[in-house]
């Protein structure tokens, strides 16, 4: 039978405690009232998604995972208006109530019902929405509420559309710095997807200079070439025992003697954020999106006396994502160089290995591209 009539599809299923995804045939979803089935053309894989799986943040496993999703509208449920079969779309990752004070003030991450589709529960009532939409995008099709869809302009390839979530996280971080035009911004863990996203978006945000921090100079050079603005590097591998001796702070101040205007932190561990804070000018802002479980090593008195602001942010909002789509559509930013790996769904565990190990360089953004069968029985 044709794809439109298919009763089964291929999906990558995560099981608790396992290290690889299982490719299984499962029923093709059918849309209910107010729902849409999307044919998935690209689904992103991220270290964060793997970490949510490992830590058990998805209470519904075994299930299909994957929160970064783009494709075309495949089927419409009753009551869906304003979208048509065949439209190119991305699926916004955040499931929320859409009614509370946080949802109505561009802070949807704080919604008590917040969950990330195919990834994790965050709010105390997030499990309720995730139970309604338990499956993610590492599959040939996905069923979602119509309100999660953003129609994509022509010219934005599905791989980039799937990674709008990561780009929007970077855009959120840049916005939170409140940096003035021409500002100097430190970026830690700059050689991954988020650092590379900052590099391409920083000029659009008016940033004048980046100071990129990472382990390896060659990887930092690769990210720096994306930026189109002046860039300085700090290779941690060249600093010796920087973690115990404030070596990062000294290296940063060598490059920005008066202090940077802001720092954006993605380091998953270690004292990098604390040392970056000490390299900010008075009144500087530090934004962290890092899952670092270690307490900061900066004295509260240092924050107070230098009037430094420290902001934590979990991820982007719908408006951040839509702003990024507009930037891409207007040609103000080109994210296509960030798509370094494309892997078919049938080889999804190789994609996991690429994202986990990052041996292949550069490894910025990896997408899985499902290949629906023309005939499924």
Image (spheres, rainbow, N blue to C red):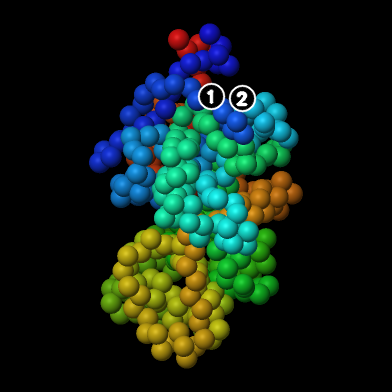
Q: Position of residue 172 (x, y in %)?
A: 57, 61
Horizontal relation, residue 137 to residue 70: left or right: left
Q: Quadrant of residue 81?
A: top right
Crowdedness of circle 2 by 10 Å Cα count: few (<14), some, many (20+)?
some
| Quadrant that contains the C terminus | top left
Residue at image location 37% in from the left, 34% down from the top: 63
- Between 340 and 346, the residue placed more toward the observer is 346
Is residue 338 visible from the viewing direction of this image? no
Hey, which residue is sitting farthest bottom in the picture?
Answer: 305
Residue at image location 49% in from the left, 88% down from the top: 306
Horizontal relation, residue 355 to residue 314: left or right: left
Residue at image location 42% in from the left, 46% down from the top: 127
**Secondary element type, mark 2:** strand
Is residue 93 visible from the viewing direction of this image? yes
Label total for image:
2
Q: Position of residue 6 (x, y in %)?
A: 51, 15
| Location of mark 2 (residue) | 75
371 w.r.t. 254: above or below: above
Hey, which residue is sitting farthest left in the picture?
Answer: 17
Residue at image location 47% in from the left, 38% down from the top: 132
- Whether pointer 2 and pointer 1 mark residues with C-beta atoms closer than 8 Å, the reply is yes
Q: Quadrant of residue 119?
A: top left
Which mark, by number, is residue 30? 1
> Which mark sits nearer the N-terminus, 2 or 1?
1
Crowdedness of circle 1 by 10 Å Cα count: few (<14), some, many (20+)?
some
313 w.r.t. 324: above or below: below
């Amino acid at each position: 039978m044709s794809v439109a009539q298919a009763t089964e599809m291929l999906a990558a299923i995560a099981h608790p405690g396992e290290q690889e995804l299982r490719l299984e045939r499962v029923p093709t979803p059918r849309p209910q009232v107010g729902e849409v089935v999307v044919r998935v053309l690209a689904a992103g894989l991220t270290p964060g998604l793997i970490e949510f799986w490992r830590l058990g943040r998805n209470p519904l496993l075994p299930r299909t995972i994957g929160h970064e999703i783009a494709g075309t509208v495949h089927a419409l449920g009753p009551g869906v208006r304003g979208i048509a079969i065949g439209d190119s779309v991305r699926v916004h990752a955040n499931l929320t109530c859409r009614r509370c004070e946080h949802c109505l003030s561009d802070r949807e991450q704080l919604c008590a019902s917040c969950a990330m589709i195919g990834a994790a529960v965050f709010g105390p009532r997030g499990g309720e929405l995730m139970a309604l939409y338990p499956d993610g995008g590492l599959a040939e099709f996905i069923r979602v509420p119509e309100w999660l869809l953003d129609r994509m302009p022509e010219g934005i390839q599905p791989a980039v559309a799937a990674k709008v979530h990561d780009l929007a996280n970077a855009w959120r971080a840049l916005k939170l710095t409140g940096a003035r035009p021409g500002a100097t911004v430190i970026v830690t863990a700059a050689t991954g997807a988020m650092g590379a996203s900052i590099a391409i978006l920083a000029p659009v945000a008016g940033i004048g200079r980046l100071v990129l921090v990472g382990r390896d100079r060659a990887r930092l050079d690769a990210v720096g070439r994306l930026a189109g603005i002046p860039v300085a590097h700090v290779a941690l591998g060249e600093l010796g025992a920087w973690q115990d001796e404030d070596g990062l702070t000294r290296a940063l101040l060598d490059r920005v003697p008066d202090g940077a205007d802001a720092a954006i932190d993605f380091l998953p561990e270690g004292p990098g954020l604390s040392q970056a804070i000490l390299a900010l000018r008075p009144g500087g802002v530090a934004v962290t999106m890092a899952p670092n479980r270690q307490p900061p090593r900066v004295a509260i008195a240092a924050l107070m006396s230098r009037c430094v602001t420290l902001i934590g942010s979990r991820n982007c909002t719908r408006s951040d994502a839509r702003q990024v789509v507009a930037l891409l559509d207007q040609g103000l930013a080109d994210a296509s160089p960030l798509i370094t790996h494309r892997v078919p769904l049938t080889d999804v565990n190789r994609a996991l290995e690429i994202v986990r190990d990052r041996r292949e360089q550069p490894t910025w953004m990896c997408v899985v591209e499902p290949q629906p069968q023309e005939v499924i029985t």
